Amino acid sequence: MPQTRAILKTWKSKPTMEGAGVRLRRAFGFHEGPRLDPFLLLDDFRSDNPDDYLAGFPWHPHRGIETISYVLRGSVEHGDSMKNQGVIGAGDVQWMTAGSGIVHQEMPKGDAEGRMHGFQLWANLPAAKKMMPPRYQEVKAATIPEVAVAGGARVRVICGRAGDTEGPVRDIVTDPEYLDVAVPAGSTFAHPTKPGHTAFAYVIEGKGALAPGAEPASDGTLVYWDDGDRVEVSTGKAPLRFLFVSGRPLKEPVAWYGPIVMNTEEELRIAFEEFQKGTFIK
């Protein structure tokens, strides 16, 4: 019999400020990160006030992680030390593997009404891949499939699978899934998960029970599941939309300071020393 995952813990995202003065809500970060291995951080930035986000995230380094940006409204202009430049807009995803090191900037721009809404998820890299060459998978909205599944839910498949449909982001070492799930009112959504993989949901609209018999979770709630081989989500009178994320835990030591995540304090020291000396980019 399939083992439906129970909820281990829920909590609300908290307001914070990052970059050059971007107001956002942090769903989880440094303190919660260990239980959500291989994921390190999830930020939810949404505002109708350009003063909250236009300062952006000027030039800064990353090493040892992947940063995954998903935009719902507005756009984000980006550039980096590899001479890449571009814009991700509504519905687009940028999956950046920093690997051995990259220096980049991300500057949010609102839509015509000044609205901005997006997410950034950080995923750790295993020790054997910390110093891999940097790379991008930039995925436009039109190439992300949206499928209807049993129960009436609609799923945007960014990475992983929903039913027989596979997302465009592939070849990621932690074997993740990243889905944007919309469940109509009065419905049930069931999704298989790999036993042993970390799995969580972040509610972005509406309300629903993220496990059988659970109290309904609302917008801005992070739900962290126990182990099992499926999740089951149900709605009452209100619809529900959430991000579903899962991945294989690394179970490795973490040495983390700011935008750099390594396995030891010595590796961390070397990374910042190289950044200061101008030898960070390999």
Image: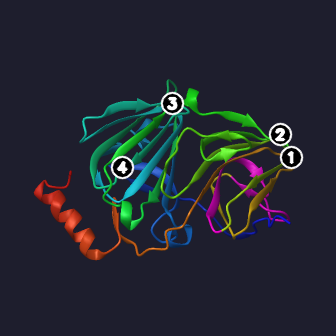
Identity, as a three-letter code, of the amino acid under mark 2: Gly
Q: CA distance from mark 3 to mark 1?
A: 29 Å
Q: Is residue 38 visible?
A: yes
**Pointers 3 and 4 in contact (CB under 8 A)?**
no
Q: Which residue is mark 4?
A: 21
Identify the residue at horizontal 61%, vertical 47% (top origin). 160
Identity, as a three-letter code, of the amino acid under mark 3: Lys
State which region is magenta. 196-218
In the depicted structure, whether residue 103 falls above or below residue 116 = below
Q: Which residue is mark 3?
A: 140
Residue 219 x %, y %: 67, 51
Is residue 157 or residue 1 the one in the foreground? 1
Sequence order check: which comes first, mark 3 or mark 4?
4
Mark 3 vs mark 1: in front:
3
Looking at the rendered structure, the secondary structure element under dot 3 is loop
Neighbour class for label 4 at 10 Å: few (<14), some, many (≥20)?
A: some
Which numbered dot is residue 152?
2
Looking at the rendered structure, the secondary structure element under dot 4 is loop
In the depicted structure, whether residue 16 falls above or below residue 164 = below
Q: Is residue 209 magenta?
A: yes
